[in-house]
Image (cartoon, rainbow, N blue to C red):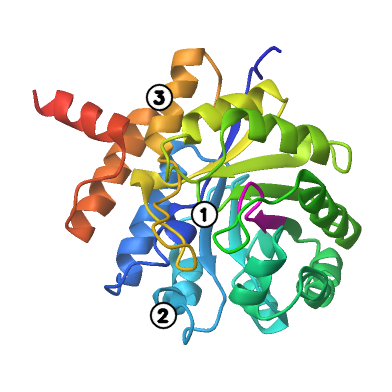
Amino acid sequence: MTLPNKVKIVEVGPRDGLQNEKETIPAAVKIELVDRLTDAGFSNIEAASFVSPKWVPQMATSTEVMEKIRRKPGVVYSVLTPNMKGFDAAVAAKADEVVIFGAASEAFSQKNINCSIAESIERFRDVAQSAKQHGIRLRGSISCSFGCPYQGEVSPDSVADVVRRLRELGCDEIDIADTIGVATPNKVKTVFERVKQEFPAERLSGHFHDTYGQALANIYAGMESGIAIYHSSIAGLGGCPYAKGATGNVSTEDVLYMMNGLGIDTGIDLDAVVDAGQFISQHLGRKAASRAGNAIAAKRQG
């Protein structure tokens, strides 16, 4: 299978990466991070989340962040919107894309949001319709697509069922997410081959966590399956509060290093991304969880 010539990297660090940080991160730091990522050449940045600050205190500054980031024409700034209140805030913040989410695992859906998968998707109907009316891009994200911390195995048919539901809501893009990082390359291929029967491959994306060190191999397997959109997080930030021991998303620096080595065009400047990763890691007071980022930074210091 030939690999794609061009891959779109969706940077999720400012939202998915930072949301679990215990210490409050000032809005100014988040704004600078997004601006650095914009300058590095990303075409899609997940910048904020309009969820209740009671549940995710770190995202309480989302309105200020969206108001003050330096927007570049053509760049899609995405926000997570769990309900109509969140959607209204996203419209006011001039978000380019809203993200709705469900799980491929019934057990995870019940534990995470206290309802069935079908009910969770139904809750997004108003958000989806409103997004269409406002001409805002709609992205759907499916957690636990390769395994669940509560029920274990998740069947490809279960993932395909949620893809179909999200397609019917009018999603422009659908993320297949390995929330706890248990996928291996063959499983990735099996799941993508199944979901491609429900939704165009060019509008599917892979979102891999690196818990077991498989994320880069899984991205490669996804590319062999014809998937050319991947999510990654600057400096490997993030985890999953509902999945014990689940480490962060795959680091953007590592993904870009691999893409550059494969001669795949991303339109992103790796050196600028390394700088951004070192910037946010210094603010957090710890080393970046990116092997390529840390190696390049150390080489510079020589």
Per the rendered image, the range of residues in magenta is 140-147
**CA gap, disc 3 and disc 2:** 33 Å
Q: Residues within 10 Å of mark 1 (few under 14, many from 20)?
A: some
Q: Is residue 283 above or below residue 10?
A: below
The N terminus, quarter of image = top right
Q: Secondary structure at mark 2?
A: helix
User: Can I make out residue 228 in this image?
Assistant: no
> Could you say which quadrant of the image residue 128 lies in?
bottom right
Q: Residues within 10 Å of mark 2 (few under 14, many from 20)?
A: some
- Residue farthest to the left, as pictured: 302
Q: Which residue is mark 2?
A: 57
Name which residue type carries label 1. Answer: Arg
**1 vs 3, front mark:** 3
- Compared across the picture, whether 160 is left or right of 228 comes to right
Name which residue type carries label 3. Answer: Tyr
> Could you say which quadrant of the image residue 101 lies in?
bottom right
Q: Is residue 223 above or below residue 232?
A: above
User: Can I make out residue 209 in this image?
Assistant: yes
- Residue farthest to the bottom, as pictured: 54
Q: Residue at x 79, y 53 (%)?
A: 158
Rendering coords of residue 10 (x, y %): 56, 44
Asked whether 144 falls inside the magenta stretch, the response is yes
Name which residue type carries label 2. Answer: Pro
The C terminus, quarter of image = top left
Q: Which residue is mark 1?
A: 71
Q: Residue at x 46, y 77 (%)?
A: 56
Of the numbered discs 3 and 2, the one sitting upstream in the chain is 2
> Could you say which quadrant of the image residue 258 lies in?
top left
**CA gap, disc 1 and disc 3:** 26 Å
Q: Which residue is mark 3?
A: 257
Rendering coords of residue 105 (x, y %): 69, 61
